Image: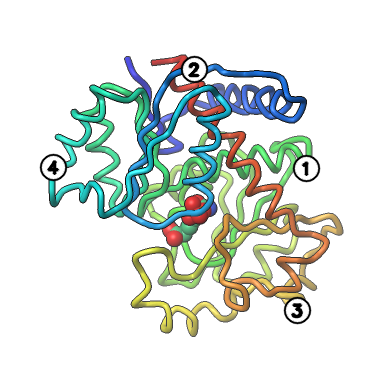
Amino acid sequence: MKRDLTSIFDLTKDEIYEIFELTKDLKEKQKKGIEHKLLKDKTLAMVFEKPSLRTRVTFETGMTQLGGHAIYLAPADIQMGKRESVKDVAKNLSRWVDIIMARVFSHSTIKELAENADVPVINGLCDLEHPCQILCDLFTIIEKKGTLEKVTIAFVGDGNNVCNSFIAASARLGFKLHVATPVDYQPNKEYMAQAKNLYWTDKPEAAIRDADVIYTDVWASMGQEAEAELRKRIFRPFQINSELLKNANKKDYVIMHCLPAHRGEEITDEVLDGPHSIVFDQAENRLHIQKGIMVFLCKNS
Ligand code: CP
Ligand code: NVA
């Protein structure tokens, strides 16, 4: 049976660690210049309904490094659901390419693609989840802290797709997760119910107090631009700045952000560019983890 990554919940704990091992090996090979063309002559279709820097460049570069090829399909090219049904896009692409990655508005579009495609489908972000991002972030945390077992991760800001994938990962792997959001902007309730090691609060200072990792993301996600001004007012107390960070007890905490950052909104320059920030190591790892994800899915499909 072919495998997909539509959600973190598509993977077991063992499979997540298998992807981390694979990624570590691929990253080492890349750094040492050792050839690793594990997807030689394979083709990846990258379907985008929204903009991207990291996802587009890292999937395309990753595929090249693995000996394959990637095709970028911009929102205007396909117009999924308008020019052609999602189902027909999935069925056509399956006849030509070996993997599909899609960045879409609705999670139901990713599910429909996966159900109708004969090849692995990877969620490159939707309204519910951003699984590639969170696998990258956890891999980065293991690199920096050695383990996930003993760390506490604090997510501060909007209960959005990135936050939901963190919660799903905590449900799968069991690490401690603190989430601070405004009361009306909490993460997905069904996801929250599944994570046993989750502590939710509307007080950012409480969430970061004992955290090893302090993480934030934009207050208005792609597609929510009309709410941006309102959200700026509501989320103001959730900004990661030097004042808030005085509440962090751990000396060696790290600052993470999936990027793009809205500097001066959810995070200040002095924090994003400061000594605790690991955001560009994190961004680099999107490349390595997605190579691991693609190799894992092709191997198991
Ligand atoms: N973090 C992330 O997915 O970045 P892009 O939106 O630039 O792809
Ligand atoms: N939550 C953000 C993540 C961007 C990578 C968004 O959906 O726009």
Q: Amino acid at mark 3?
A: Glu
Q: How far across and how far down the image is residue 285, in percent?
A: 64, 41
Q: Is mark 3 within 8 Å of ligand 2?
A: no
Q: How far across and how far down the image is residue 282, in percent?
A: 66, 48
Q: Amino acid at mark 2?
A: Lys
User: Which quarter shows the N terminus?
Assistant: top left
Label 1 and label 4: CA atoms lie apart by: 44 Å
Vertically, is 68 above or below 150? above
Mark carried by residue 144: 1
* For the residues bearing labels 3 and 2, Cβ distance under 8 angstroms: no
Q: Residues within 10 Å of mark 1 (few under 14, many from 20)?
A: few
* For the residues bearing labels 3 and 1, Cβ distance under 8 angstroms: no
Q: Residues within 10 Å of mark 4 (few under 14, many from 20)?
A: some
Tag 4 or tag 1, which sits nearer the N-term? 4
Tag 4 or tag 2, which sits nearer the N-term? 2
In the rendered image, is residue 163 in sight?
no
* Residue in front for this viewpoint, 195 or 68: 68
Q: Amino acid at mark 4?
A: Ser
Of circles 2 and 4, which is in front?
2
Q: Amino acid at mark 1?
A: Lys
Q: Give the tally of numbered discs.
A: 4
Of circles 2 and 1, which is in front?
2
Mark carried by residue 40: 2
Tag 1 or tag 3, which sits nearer the N-term? 1
Vertically, is 186 above or below 296? below
Vertically, is 232 above or below 203? below
Residue that numbered label 4 is attached to: 85
Tag 2 or tag 3, which sits nearer the N-term? 2
Vertically, is 157 above or below 21? below
Residue that numbered label 3 is attached to: 243
